[in-house]
Amino acid sequence: MGKKIVILNGSPRLHGNTAGLIEAFVRGAKQAGHEIVRFDLQKMDIHPCLGCLGGGKDPLSPCIQKDGMAEIYPQYETADVLVLASPMYYWSITAQLKTAFDRLFAVTEKSAEYHIPMQHCILLMAAEGDTPDNFEPVEHYYHALLRHLGWENLGEVYAGGVMQAGDIAGHPSLEKAYNLGKNI
């Protein structure tokens, strides 16, 4: 039976190298019979978390802020897999992705025990650098995040050496992303 996969695309370039990774992943996932819901965060009006701890009071609208997250919350709550997709910006994920991810806490606030609905995650990342240690800060952050959330890592695809839009064409990471999507 297919899984519901929600993709949070944190790239500001909608047709850049991160999009290439996403498209390869989606081809494989659709071939395997999975349902895909993709959010291009750059096109959405999403405000940063206020840290107010006021979320979770309205089950249909978990956050007190009313913005583009209203589209994401119901999909996130019913997803089997969350894909975090981002280019590397200063050895981290983009502000677009971090902002949306922080706001997912409002869903956690819906239960007194701070239950987190998601359990499985994937990371797709493109970057200019391609040295062996280039992705280490992101890997550390991603693994620590999942460890603290109690989530299972279903895979990571890192594409180094891709700076200009289109550099991803023919990159070996595309096949890895495709296979990851196909074999979930």
Image (cartoon, rainbow, N blue to C red):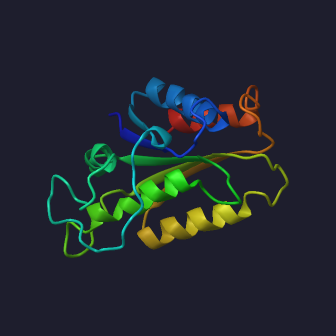
Expressed as whole percent of the image width and height from the top left, the position of residue 117 reads 30, 58
Residue at 52% across, 25% down: 27
Residue located at (70% from left, 37% from top): 173
Left or right, 44 with respect to 176, comes to left
Quadrant position of residue 150: bottom left
Place of residue 97 in the rendered image (x, y in percent of width and height, measured from the top left)? 51, 52
Residue 27 against residue 112 in the figure, above or below? above
In this rendering, position of residue 65 left or right of residue 123:
left
Q: Position of residue 120 (x, y in %)?
A: 43, 54
Up-down relation of residue 120 to residue 13 (above or below) = below
Between 50 and 120, the one nearer to me in the picture: 50
- What residue is drawn where x is 39% and y is 50%? 46
Which residue occupies the foreground of this view, 66 or 120? Answer: 66
Residue 105: image x %, image y %?
34, 65
Rendering quarter of residue 51: bottom left
Residue at (49, 65) in percent of width and height = 146
Q: Quadrant of residue 126?
A: top right
Counting the numbered discs, the total is 0
Q: Is residue 98 above or below residue 83?
A: below
Quadrant occupied by the N terminus = top left
